[in-house]
Image (tube, rainbow, N blue to C red):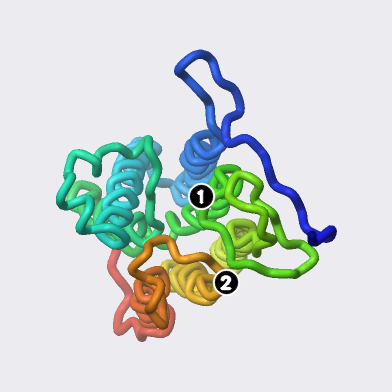
Amino acid sequence: MNFASIFWNVSPEIIKLGPISLRWYGLLFASTFVLGYIILSKIFRNEKKPQSDLEQLSIYVILGTVIGARLGHCLFYDPVYYLSHPIEIIKVWEGGLASHGAAIGIITAIYLLTKKQKDKSMLWILDRLVIVVALGGALIRLGNLFNSEIIGKASNVPWAFIFIRVDDIPRHPAQLYESIFYFISFFILYFVYLKTDKKTKQGYLFGLFLVLIFGFRFFVEFIKENQSPFEQNMFLNMGQLLSIPFVAAGLFFMFRKQKELIKKKK
């Protein structure tokens, strides 16, 4: 027995009343949108953008996140099963969300939104939205910790967690690693937005977000258990393969040369 390990047996449920239960994951997931709205509300006020635009943005982001994350999980990690049982795709309450799918869903939602909010470019919105998305990622990974899911590989590090609800093996608390790094990414992005002129270079903050989040995701996957059986014989798992194009896109947006300033529409 590894006496240095941390025994983790926290219930994923906060309270249960008959068939209804409040779970830590659900609370933290909902908190991402509440806190995100508060922070973006301040950003929109400072930049003299109408709050009605933010309310519309919030609806698009919520739908893009949930739909994209669910479809990403179903199609990236177990397409054969879900395409054979399509009704299972809509059962979001049973779990199964993918961050790469959420990213695609959010980008798609913002693209559709800019068809209505023509005074703001897609990159202008993404540069500000990714600040709170990083915070949301940190909270969601804490939810994964409470669920004892997305666990790390076996390890003898002193801070290893033994997830009692999974097995008796000391493991890397991979969810905690990701959560801490995403919190750090949130502060980095917010600092760059507030204290530098990088927000005037459209796409820079969006690119920095992609490099930070998916760059870290690529490396942390080496100490995480694979999420699907088909990944067992792969040199790079699905999470890593999906992260590579996101990092490449991030570097492009960070270091591309803007040939001309985008004129503001009257």
Q: Which of 207 and 11 is in front in this view?
A: 11
User: What is the crowding at mark 2: few (fewer than 14 residues within 10 Å), some, or many (at least 20)?
Assistant: some
Q: Which percent across, then down, holds residue 3?
A: 84, 58
Q: Which mark is residue 9?
A: none
Q: Looking at numbered disc 2 in the image, what kind of residue is underneath it?
A: Ile
Q: Can residue 77 be seen in this view?
A: yes
**Foreground pick, 6 / 55:** 6
* Residue 164, x across and y down, in percent: 66, 46
18 vs 143: above or below:
above
Disc 1 residue type? Gly
Of mark 1 and mark 2, the one earlier in the sequence is 1
* Residue 80 at x, y percent in the picture: 20, 58
Q: In this view, does 68 lie above or below 210?
A: above
Point 24% across, 41% down: residue:
88
Of the numbered discs in the image, which one, if any, rests on residue 223? 2
Above or below for 159 versus 247: above
Q: Residue 136: which numbered mark, if any?
A: 1
In the orientation shown, which residue stands out farthest toward the right? 3
Q: Is residue 174 above or below residue 67?
A: below
- Name which quarter of the figure residue 127 lies in: bottom left
Could you tell me which quadrant the N terminus lies in? bottom right
Q: Is label 1 or label 2 in front?
A: 2
Q: Residue at x 53, y 51 (%)?
A: 149
Secondary element at tag 1: helix
Relative side of 31 to 109, left or right: right
Q: How far apart are marks 1 and 2 (CA)?
A: 22 Å
Q: Quadrant of the C terminus?
A: bottom left
**Which residue is at 32% across, 75% downward?**
261
